[in-house]
Image (cartoon, helix red, strand yellow):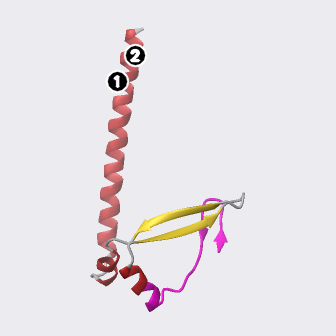
Amino acid sequence: VICFPDRCVAEVPLTDQLVAAFKKGQAITLTSVNFQNQPNPIKIALQGFSGAYDGPALQQSDIEDRQKKLQDFVAKNNQDFAKKLKEEQDKAKTAN
């Protein structure tokens, strides 16, 4: 395990046995331990793992397109939220 200020990374060999267990499983729980020596379990659903693992590989251009769409979606939502927040603040100012 290697820890950085914002994350820890653990390397585990992806054996055939581990892949088979992921394909059969419903979820996996990964647990880290914080600086107070308290466990921090994170449950991850394995639904769709087999399809993703056995399916066709994604092309880099597909990944970039998906990332761009996601960024655009987040940016639009942020703009919409900022607009609504300003409108509500303006309403509150005029009400006082």
Which residue sits at x=41%, y=80%? 22
Residue 12 belongs to magenta span: yes
Residue at which label 2 appears: 92
Element carrying mark 1: helix
Measured in 3D between alpha carbons, the distance from the residue under mark 2 to the one under mark 1, in whole angstroms, is 9 Å
Query: How far across and how far down the image is residue 69, in percent?
Result: 30, 57
Q: Position of residue 43 (x, y in %)?
A: 47, 64
**Three-letter amino acid code at disc 1?**
Glu
Q: Do tag 2 and tag 1 residues touch (Cβ < 8 Å)? A: no
| On-image quarter of the N terminus | bottom right
Label 1 packing within 10 angstroms: few (<14), some (14-19), many (20+): few
Q: Position of residue 60 (x, y in %)?
A: 34, 74
Q: Quadrant of residue 86?
A: top left
Magenta span contains residue 48: no
85 relative to 62, above or below: above
As drawn, is 24 to the left or to the right of 34? left
Q: Residue furthest right?
A: 36
Considering the image in quadrants, where does the C terminus appear? top left
Residue drawn 32% across and 77% down? 52
Is 90 in front, or is 52?
A: 52
Q: Position of residue 45 (x, y in %)?
A: 39, 67
Going by the numbered disc 2, the residue's amino acid type is Ala
Q: Magenta span covers which residues?
A: 1-19
Q: Residue at x 35, y 62 (%)?
A: 67
Dot 2: element: helix
76 relative to 10, above or below: above
Q: Is residue 12 left or right of residue 91?
A: right
Quickly name the residue at label 1. Answer: 87
> In the image, what residue occupies the spot 38% across and 34% down?
82
